Image (tube, helix red, strand yellow):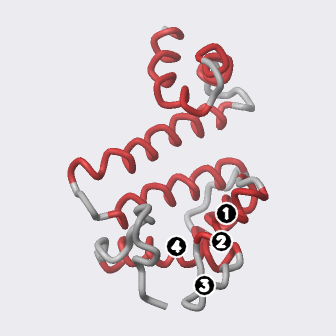
Amino acid sequence: MGAVNVDRWLPFFEPFFSSPADTRSFVEPLESLCLGDPRHQAKIMMHQTQRLISLSDDLPQIRKDNEGLRLLFLLICAENIAKLANKYDGESQSRAYVRNFFSWFLSVEDQRNMCVGMTHHDRRPMPLQQAVDALYDVRCDVVHEGKYWGFHFHDGDTPMLNLTS
């Protein structure tokens, strides 16, 4: 049973490790955790990350150019991971936990890149919390208003795609 479950997760995580052996060394111990083990939440985090990121990655095949939906699944993942890491099982504090994810789990360099990549109209970088809040506001537009068409990730060519304040 263990090898089948391990093999299920390897393709997703392999791009993030330097070798297949390193990937297996990451996945195998987590996949072997049983319910009741104090580290079992790490297994759930691994599963949820793969599931939610894969949903986001697959969305362009069914809803091309609707990147607000992709962002929704990425932020659901961020919130879920931060809540699991903090052993929080409540149903509130979503924005706070998304903020926590970006401050807890992004390297200083990744935080800097995010701030530089999200700027005000005058091209000043946004502080991290403001950048995360801007993404979270898009998530809220998708969830509460059904508006999933107004957000676009940088496409490599167009310098600014989102013109709302």
Q: Which mark is residue 113?
A: 1
Which mark is nearer the camera, 3 or 1?
Answer: 3
Say whether marks 1 and 2 touch (CB < 8 Å). Answer: yes
First in residue order: circle 3 vs circle 1: 1
Q: Which residue is mark 4?
A: 136
| Label 1, residues with CA under 10 Å away: few <14, some 14-19, many ≥20 | few
Q: Which residue is mark 2?
A: 116
Gap in angstroms between the C-alphas marked 3 and 4: 20 Å
Write the residue at 29% across / 73% down.
149
Gap in angstroms between the C-alphas marked 3 and 1: 14 Å
Which mark is nearer the camera, 4 or 2?
Answer: 2
Q: Nearer the viewer, residue 112 or 13?
A: 112
First in residue order: circle 2 vs circle 3: 2
Gap in angstroms between the C-alphas marked 1 and 4: 18 Å
Name the amino acid type tagged 2. Val
Which mark is nearer the camera, 3 or 4?
Answer: 3
Relative placement, left or right, of 86 versus 28 is right
First in residue order: circle 4 vs circle 2: 2
Instruction: Look at the numbered disc 2 and give the secondary structure of its residue.
Output: helix
Q: Which residue is mark 3?
A: 123
Name the amino acid type tagged 3. Arg
Gap in angstroms between the C-alphas marked 4 and 2: 17 Å
Q: Nearer the viewer, residue 160 or 96?
A: 160
Which percent across, then down, holds residue 64?
A: 24, 57
| Label 2, residues with CA under 10 Å away: few <14, some 14-19, many ≥20 | some
Name the amino acid type tagged 4. Tyr
Gap in angstroms between the C-alphas marked 1 and 2: 5 Å
Residue 100, image quadrant: bottom right
Say whether marks 3 and 1 touch (CB < 8 Å). Answer: no
